[in-house]
Image (cartoon, rainbow, N blue to C red):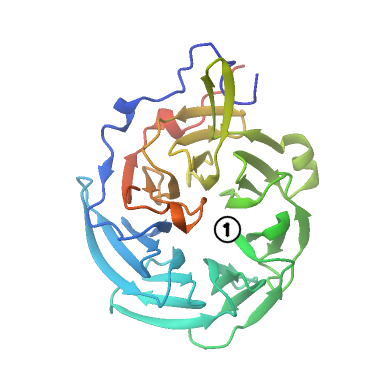
Amino acid sequence: MSFFGKPAGTANATQGTEADLANDIIVQNPPEDSISDMAFSPQAEFFSVASWDKKVRIYEVSANGTTEGRAMYEHDAPVLTTRWTADGTKVISGGCDKQVKLYDVQSGQSQQIGAHDAAVKSVRFVECGPANTPVVVSGSWDKTLRYWDTRTPNPIATIQLPERVYAMDSSQKLLVVATAERHVCIIDLNNPQQVSKQAMSPLKWQTRSIACYPAGNGYALGSIEGRCAFQYIDEGEQSNYGFTFKCHRRQETKAGRTENHIYTLNSVCAHPLYGTFATAGSDGCFHFWDKDSKHRLKGFPSLGGPISAAAFNRNGSIYAVAVSYDWSKGHQFNTPQHPNLIRLHPTKDEEVKQKNKRR
């Protein structure tokens, strides 16, 4: 038996069906090319979408679940990452034009607030030091992490990293950066100008996704080999509670032979209230997990194309997934037949909330 679910051949109540997806909302007027990242406002039901069509789009989710495009701004090349400021008034983005941009929702104006020497893979809005100074942090393929005060053009600090940034996330005073060659750099935002701890990913293959725990005491890593790792900053907690497991894999029997299909884990997200997790992959499936009881809460059937990005809204009542080409097979496989859409899945507590522990 694996950590999650039940042995093969037994009934599994955690497996969802098409009926569980019947209430999903399809977002109107999606991007025109592959979707690379999505993020919800921490203050209202708005979300931003970064795309390979060089645009960042902002949508509003109304009370009845319908969506409407509210704004759009452009980069000079594919956009790889987007996030919101804590007050929900601005959107941050970065991409292959090497720029970090800030968009003011109220004025409709965008401005460049930073630049790298290579593509910007990830941006976050963080609060640093004892005074909780608000800054934008960006990670790039130029092997640096840079902090930006939105009012000045030069970085207020730069950290040299061992390799290109592939994924990054933050929560509380924890910032974790995953780079090429499986390096993981941990930064205490009380002392943001240096890496406080450097480790190697416990997963044997390239890191694709990362999510910090809401409590700021650890992080989840996802790899291209259909594995996820739950890690803790404290060594004692890591020894007691850290583990890895397989997910986003499928067995198929053809002509008496069993074939194992392994898929990239493109997104891992923490539920903002319950601390459970969602994973989504190039198999087109998403799953909800309880890391504390090592249990899969619910898994869902394929959505008909790779899930390239995903995000919870501010209270976890909506899980948004982008079904679009994830570039895992190169540009030659990005054909017009690939779907390119965003689905909003209204979550139920039985899908995303921890079960009561047995006594």
Q: Is residue 78 left or right of residue 289?
A: left
Residue 194: x percent and y percent? 74, 71
Can residue 41 be seen here? The reply is yes
Image quarter (top left, top right, bottom left or bottom right) of the C terminus: top right
Relative side of 266 to 19, left or right: right
The answer to whether 287 is drawn above or below residue 328 in the figure is: above
Q: Position of residue 302 (x, y in %)?
A: 40, 34
Q: Is residue 172 visible?
A: no
Question: In the orientation shown, which residue stands out farthest toward the top?
Answer: 10
Q: Position of residue 72 (x, y in %)?
A: 29, 70
Residue 137: image quadrant is bottom right
Q: Quarter of the image for the N terminus: give it.
A: top right
Say what amino acid the circle numbered 1 marks.
Asp
Q: Nearer the viewer, residue 221 or 105?
A: 221
Is residue 251 depicted above or below 332 in this figure? Answer: above
* Residue corresponding to mark 1: 169
Nearest to the observer: residue 327 or residue 162: 327
Relative to 200, is 98 above or below? below
Tally the marks.
Answer: 1
